Image (cartoon, grey):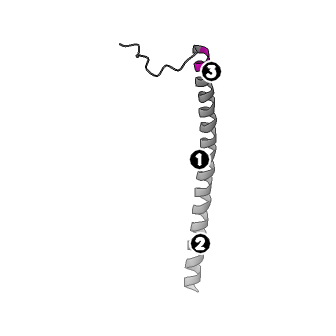
Amino acid sequence: MEELERLEIKVSYLENLVDELNKAVIEQDKTIMVMQKQIESLEKKVEDLIEVSGEARPNRRPPHY
């Protein structure tokens, strides 16, 4: 009987741990989705800037030269 009680307690702790980990994964997923939207927005802005300038300038010198 004592063994069964010990196992039930262990399972209870594991269930709580799984719930906490699940909440953490859900929060991380939300953060990743927000970051993906930000990246898409930045990519669009870069594309728009390239269109406005007429060309991509990868070899342009930084202003401190």
Give the number of the mark in front: 2 or 1.
1
The residues colored magenta run: 48-52
Q: Name the residue under label 1.
A: 28
Q: How far apart are marks 2 and 1 (CA)?
A: 25 Å
Query: Which residue sits furthest bottom?
Result: 1
Identify the residue shown where x is 61% and y is 66%.
15
Q: Which of 37 and 6 is in front in this view?
A: 37
Disc 3 element: helix
Q: Nearer the viewer, residue 24 or 16?
A: 24
Classify 55 as above or below 41: above
**Which label sits on residue 61?**
none
**Which label sits on residue 48?**
3
Residue 31: percent from left, percent from top: 60, 42
Classify 53 as above or below 58: above
Disc 2 element: helix
Q: Mark 2 points at which residue?
A: 11
Residue 8: percent from left, percent from top: 60, 76
Tell which circle, 2 or 1, labels the residue nearer the N-terminal end: 2
Give the number of the mark in front: 1 or 3.
3
Q: Does the magenta stretch include residue 13?
A: no
Q: How many labels does the image show?
A: 3
Residue 62: percent from left, percent from top: 41, 16
Decide whether the magenta segment is chiefly helix, strand or loop.
helix
Tell which circle, 2 or 3, labels the residue nearer the N-terminal end: 2
Figure quadrant of the C terminus = top left
Identify the residue shown where x is 63% and y is 27%.
44
Query: Which residue sits furthest left?
Result: 65
* Residue type at numbered disc 1: Gln
Figure quadrant of the N terminus = bottom right
Disc 1 crowd rating (10 Å Cα; few below 14, some 14-19, many 20+) is few
Identify the residue shown where x is 57% and y is 78%.
7
